[in-house]
């Protein structure tokens, strides 16, 4: 079962996204801050991270760098939940670590599809 | 008999002999009027005497120790600005008389010819005339003051456009001196019957939104137009604030609404437990309505972007006839369900134009779906396209109930569902036609309706048929206006992927398609994308300086280089950057700079 780290500062969105992923068979660690995301990823390395790029406690660059600094085999893919486009993220020097973008606000169905695609795992 | 107050006369006369004669003349005056006399031998002493006590009139000798000849009058007028001046001349100066009156003397009297009564009349009339003149002058000054201080421009122009009068506000609006305005024909259309809103293109390149009202008038017995001009820039600024407000609200609405829909979706599809059919039905009503609300928010955002001039554009060469065909095809099923015949009428030879295809399609869809909504059963809706004086004329015609004449002008306004009685169950956003109008005007076109109650409606869209360069020019012009209004910079990036990276390459078509997909997704927040032909693009990036433009070029070259399998060096020539205002100040210069950049 793939583990998804879902970071989103809106508690309700977090609940909905997590519910959708769990219903499809993913295991979800849901957090509301960058600090909690880093702590969770250090405690247990996720197979995928879906990150709101506008978390209140940490700039997205720092969060991504922090996640990348966690030792482990290979690099888990990162989905950016953002209203920026790839070039705007490039302007902010974020694009190289991001596998896919989900324009906000988006449905959880789109998140599920991307997660399935990137982890190669559907419902067991 | 009413006694008049005594008049104070200042006699400026250096000859004691003449002064004595004058004194005697006054003594001879019999008709009851009384005069107080004061004498001065020079202009300077006269001025001092006038300061000492109030005077009503000056009797002036032209030849004085401190001033000699006709010029004395001018000097006296400067020294006694509010007093009537009567000139006393000798026999030898009699010929000067008329000239002296023209120069402002109230009267002239020839010494030795005057009698006391004559002198008395002359003085009384002069004083009275001067009083009237002063009043007239005051009134004129008031009117002039009002005209000059009015924040609205006031102009008078002949029928041939020649300007005869302009006030200070008109100078400010045109950014031209009055003398300059009077030299040139009026650069404005004006219709005496209605208030026009227009845009004034100033010599300094700025565009001024202007309200023009005109009335017929007569100026120097010539029929003319009186024009009242109001600079709408502050009004527009208010509108912009309002637009930003709406835009913010829209985002704030959209976000919770997506949570609402998402929550219901999760319950409906059983992700959080069993749901029975009754519950599903209720949930679907909720989802349907949240979707409707979402459409309304989308429409609100669209119209806001259009009005604020920030609607992103995606321009490519479009076969307009094909667009009609596709729309008719897409809607034939819906038409069939309503038992309406959907017909098309296309020109023999195809019509191509550079435009935002999806937006023009949205206009057609809007008009066609409206026409279907209002069509009676077994009616026909006809969508036609034909060339019209070098432009493309679309028409969507229905046989519905038609529109009341009073409602026609309101039809294209926001939230104006006034035009026609809506059939039951039809719920629109109230923004469809306003968005249509906005989109058509974004393309430099026009939309209107011809309809009579009971006789169906014809909605017309006249779109200019633009070659690439004209479309690009229009887009850059719009961007320049935006940049000037918001004082920011912007960049235009020319991306000749096909020409520079793929000449003779196999799979060129596929690579071009991938390049287009890359630009559309990874640069989706760029302000405008123009496709000249396959693999040849121009990209407008709002609010970016040359440095950011360079980063964008690098980003694009990297992306396109990956697609074409080029090394970094080979990809580095794929883009050309032009930056406003560093490289060009207007769209003409832009086109020239772009052409030479592409040749280089």
Image (spheres, rainbow, N blue to C red):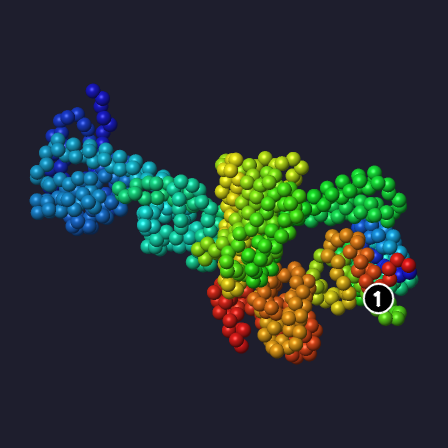
| Residue name at image x 64 percent, y 42 percent | B338
Residue B290 x %, y %? 73, 43
Q: Looking at the image, which residue is at 16% across and 50% down?
A: B69
Answer with left or right where residue B282 lies relative to residue B303: right
Where residue B448 appears, as percent x and y from the top left, is 50, 46
Q: Nearer the viewer, residue B19 or B349?
A: B349
- Farthest residue to the top: give it: B1
Q: Residue at x 76, y 44 (%)?
A: B287
**B570 w.r.t. B341: above or below:** below
Q: Is residue B236 visible?
A: no
Task: Report the quarter where the N terminus of chain B lies.
Answer: top left
Q: Which residue is mark 1?
A: A76
**Residue B400 higher or lower than B366, as above or below:** above
* Of B201 and B520, the residue lying toward us: B520
Question: How many tags in the picture?
Answer: 1
Residue B296: quadrant of the picture: top right
Q: Could you tell me residue B552's position as x and y percent?
A: 64, 68
Chain label for disc 1: A
């Amino acid at each position: 079962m793939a583990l998804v780290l879902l970071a989103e500062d809106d508690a309700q969105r977090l609940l909905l996204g997590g519910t959708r992923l769990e219903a499809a068979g993913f295991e979800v660690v849901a957090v509301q801050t960058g600090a909690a995301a880093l702590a969770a990823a250090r405690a247990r390395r996720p197979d995928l991270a879906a990150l709101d790029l506008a978390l209140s406690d940490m700039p997205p660059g720092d969060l991504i760098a922090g996640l990348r600094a966690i030792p482990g085999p290979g690099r888990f893919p990162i989905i950016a939940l953002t209203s920026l486009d790839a070039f705007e993220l490039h302007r902010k020097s974020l694009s190289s670590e991001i596998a896919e973008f989900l324009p906000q606000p988006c449905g959880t169905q789109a998140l599920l599809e991307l997660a399935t695609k990137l982890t190669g795992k559907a419902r067991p | 008999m009413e006694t008049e107050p005594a008049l104070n006369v200042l006699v400026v006369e250096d000859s004691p002999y003449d002064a004595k004669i004058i004194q005697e003349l006054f003594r001879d005056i019999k008709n009851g009027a009384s005069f107080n006399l004061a004498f001065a031998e020079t202009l300077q002493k006269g001025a001092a005497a006038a300061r000492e006590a109030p005077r009503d009139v000056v009797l002036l000798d032209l030849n004085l120790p401190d001033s000699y000849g006709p010029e004395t009058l001018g000097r006296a007028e400067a020294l006694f600005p509010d007093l009537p001046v009567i000139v006393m001349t000798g026999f030898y100066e009699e010929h000067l008389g008329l000239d002296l009156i023209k120069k402002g003397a109230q009267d002239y009297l020839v010494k030795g010819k005057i009698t006391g009564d004559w002198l008395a009349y002359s003085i009384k009339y002069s004083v009275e005339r001067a009083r009237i003149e002063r009043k007239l002058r005051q009134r004129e000054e008031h009117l002039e003051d009002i005209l000059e201080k009015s924040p609205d421009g006031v102009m008078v122009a002949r029928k041939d456009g020649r300007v005869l009068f302009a006030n200070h506000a008109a100078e400010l609006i045109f950014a031209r001196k009055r003398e300059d305005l009077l030299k040139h024909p009026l650069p404005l259309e004006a219709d005496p019957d209605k208030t026009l809103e227009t845009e004034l293109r100033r010599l300094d390149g700025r565009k001024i939104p202007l309200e023009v009202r005109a009335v017929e008038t007569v100026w120097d017995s010539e029929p003319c137009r009186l024009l009242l001009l109001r600079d709408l820039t502050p009004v527009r600024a208010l509108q912009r604030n309002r637009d930003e407000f709406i835009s913010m609200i829209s985002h704030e609405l959209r976000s919770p609404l997506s949570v609402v829909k998402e929550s219901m979706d999760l319950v409906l599809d059983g992700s959080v437990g069993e749901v029975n059919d009754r519950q599903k039905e209720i949930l679907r009503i909720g989802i349907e309505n949240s979707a409707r609300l979402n459409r309304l928010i989308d429409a609100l955002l669209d119209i806001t972007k259009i009005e604020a001039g920030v609607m992103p554009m995606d321009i490519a060469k479009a076969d307009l006839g094909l667009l009609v065909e596709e729309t008719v095809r897409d809607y034939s099923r819906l038409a069939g369900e309503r038992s309406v015949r959907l017909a098309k009428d296309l020109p023999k030879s195809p019509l191509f134009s550079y435009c935002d295809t999806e937006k023009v399609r949205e206009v057609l869809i809007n008009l066609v779906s409206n026409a279907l909504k209002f069509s009676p059963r077994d009616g026909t809706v006809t969508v036609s396209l034909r060339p019209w004086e070098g432009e493309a004329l679309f028409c969507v015609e229905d046989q519905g109930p038609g529109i009341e004449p009073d409602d026609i002008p309101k039809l294209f306004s926001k939230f104006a569902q006034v035009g026609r009685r809506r059939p039951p169950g039809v719920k629109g956003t109230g923004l469809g036609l306003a968005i249509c109008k906005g989109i058509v005007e974004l393309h430099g076109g026009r939309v209107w309706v011809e309809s009579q109650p009971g006789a169906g409606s014809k909605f017309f869209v006249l779109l200019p048929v633009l070659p690439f360069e004209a479309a690009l020019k229009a887009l850059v012009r719009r961007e320049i206006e935006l940049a000037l209004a918001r004082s920011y910079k912007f960049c235009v990036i020319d991306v000749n992927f096909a020409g520079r990276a793929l000449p003779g390459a196999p799979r060129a078509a596929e690579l071009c398609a991938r390049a287009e997909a890359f630009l559309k997704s990874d640069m989706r927040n760029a302000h405008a994308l123009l496709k000249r032909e396959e693999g040849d693009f121009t990209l407008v990036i709002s609010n970016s300086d040359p440095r950011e433009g360079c980063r964008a070029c690098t980003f694009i070259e990297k992306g396109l280089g990956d697609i074409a399998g080029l090394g970094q060096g080979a990809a580095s020539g794929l883009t050309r950057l032009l930056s406003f205002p560093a490289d060009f100040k207007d769209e003409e210069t832009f086109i020239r700079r772009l052409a030479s950049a592409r040749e280089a």
